[in-house]
Image (cartoon, coloured by chain):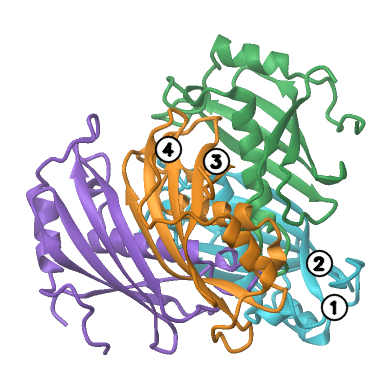
Chain colours: A purple, B orange, C green, D cyan
């Protein structure tokens, strides 16, 4: 699928909670790893003249995750691209190919000092353009 | 405000990220602490015949959190109460009294073996009734 | 006890692992919170001209920690104070007053650019002097 | 090297602290992942009639870890094997092949109810025998 990236993320034992499942908080860590995996260069997130921050995030859990030595696959795509903000879609896929969660994030690009929105750099825009997938709904599962 | 509980949650140094702020993932930890703080007894969450699981969660970040030896205050209330599911509202308040984030969670009460919804216990229902606040919108800030 | 500080640290649900206890990794988070609680000002740790880093850390687990709404108390003291490094002792005390773990850390004060040891600031030295406890062995339990 | 296992562990953005390095607490998570990676089956850790718990852990930090999309490699080996306890050695190797940290853990095999030491299962013993490396000192770096 054009635009959709697939980022493998290892589960950790410490992601598990007393219910024996990956705790819901760890899912947000997986989403963050997918964002970083999409952009590769940390200087696009912090230290390169602007900061990227999470404005909104939504997650719907579909199926509990157990521990496995297999990574989960986080599918990630850009569903909206503005000048100083953009929206990401995600699906977290387990070792059986099942969708464990669907999520979306509104990201803002801000001035590190003032926190005010600033125009994103061309380098960031190019990366996001490449991951664009022209729908807000999840892509059909492969 | 009737119904709204205020749960103090300590920040940790390890909640901070390279941007020097509490990372967005840690906010979900704070929400979880507020849920546990509301219910007090872990056996209501796991081990007492049913499990509670997160079905959906939404968060809107309003203001970055820095480190402080002061705890954040997580306001938490029940905005909807069904037989096997309920909805929580939250506001995370920083040491200056400012709203750092607003959030909501749909929780389900499920059978630990099958994962199917089951009727919640009277004990859990009583606790949730006491934290009920009859609106889906956040209460006015104090 | 002169020198020994007592820092309360809240447990979190996400500190628990499938065994139902606070996972061993979270103990290191508690030690870090005690270090930060001793020094109060994050600029003494990073951003004030030098960085503080962990060189060695040892922990001996004495008793498992369960979840409790009571904080653990981390007793922390300075057992050795050099020019660019120092050693901390700790005891983690549970809600019953029992010792859950004993630990020690060798800390170094380094140049943020080169990572080389540098002389600590007078401000940091004064704080550490105040927390000095003249023994490498844990203080008698109160 | 006979006995020594090499377990890749992904770094996460949330492992980083305001100093921009992997926080010391996350190193203990990496050690735990290596332990789990050595044993593969979580029922050997919990739920199979006995629990494995950390008794002592020591770490010496040699070189700070930055973020990288490359995993760290955790070398892990069994340096001592008793009936109800054993000792592990580790080295955490960064993406340049440099040693970032050396560590050791004393593990105990205990009764889940009483916490008392019990004889480990033959299955666990066989796995540990295979990872035995007859020295307490780290193997020469490859």
Q: Disc 3 and disc 1: Cα gap in Å?
A: 37 Å
Q: Are marks 2 and 3 on the same chain?
A: no
State the mark number for residue B12: 3
Nearer mark to the viewer, of 3 and 4: 3
First of labels 4, 1 by sequence position: 4
Residue at screen point 81% across, 67% down: D86
Q: CA distance from mark 2 to mark 4?
A: 36 Å
Q: Which residue is mark 2?
A: D86
Q: Between marks 2 and 1, how big is the CA–CA gap? A: 10 Å
Callout in the foreground (4, 1): 4
Disc 3 from disc 4: Cα separation: 12 Å
Chain letter belonging to callout 2: D
Answer yes or no: do the residues labelled 2 and 1 have beta carbons within 8 Å?
A: yes
Q: Quadrant of residue A46?
A: top left
The answer for how far apart the CA atoms under marks 4 and 1 are is: 42 Å
User: Do the residues bearing badges 4 and 1 touch, measured as CB atoms within 8 Å?
Assistant: no
Tell me whether the residue at label 2 lies in contact with that at label 3, contact meaning CB atoms closer than 8 angstroms.
no
Callout 3: 10 Å neighbours few (<14), some, many (20+)?
Answer: many
Q: Which residue is mark 4?
A: D18
Please state the chain letter of the residue tagged with numbered disc 3 in the rendered image. B
The answer to whether tags 2 and 1 share a subunit is yes
Place of residue D62 in the rendered image (x, y in percent of width and height, measured from the top left): 56, 44
Q: Work out whether mark 2 precedes mark 4 in sequence or the reverse, and give the earlier one.
A: 4
């Amino acid at each position: 699928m054009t635009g959709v990236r697939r980022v493998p993320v290892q589960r950790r034992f410490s992601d598990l909670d007393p219910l024996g499942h990956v705790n819901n908080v760890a899912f947000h860590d997986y989403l963050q790893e997918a964002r970083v995996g999409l952009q590769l260069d940390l200087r696009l997130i912090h230290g390169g003249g602007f900061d990227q921050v999470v404005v909104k995030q939504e997650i719907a859990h579909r199926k509990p995750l157990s521990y496995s030595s297999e990574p989960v696959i986080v599918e990630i795509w850009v569903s909206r691209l503005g000048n100083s903000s953009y929206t990401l879609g995600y699906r977290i896929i387990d070792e059986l190919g099942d969708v464990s969660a669907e999520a979306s994030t509104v990201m803002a690009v801000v001035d590190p000092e003032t926190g005010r929105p600033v125009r994103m750099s061309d380098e960031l825009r190019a990366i996001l353009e490449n991951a664009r997938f022209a729908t807000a709904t999840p892509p059909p599962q492969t």
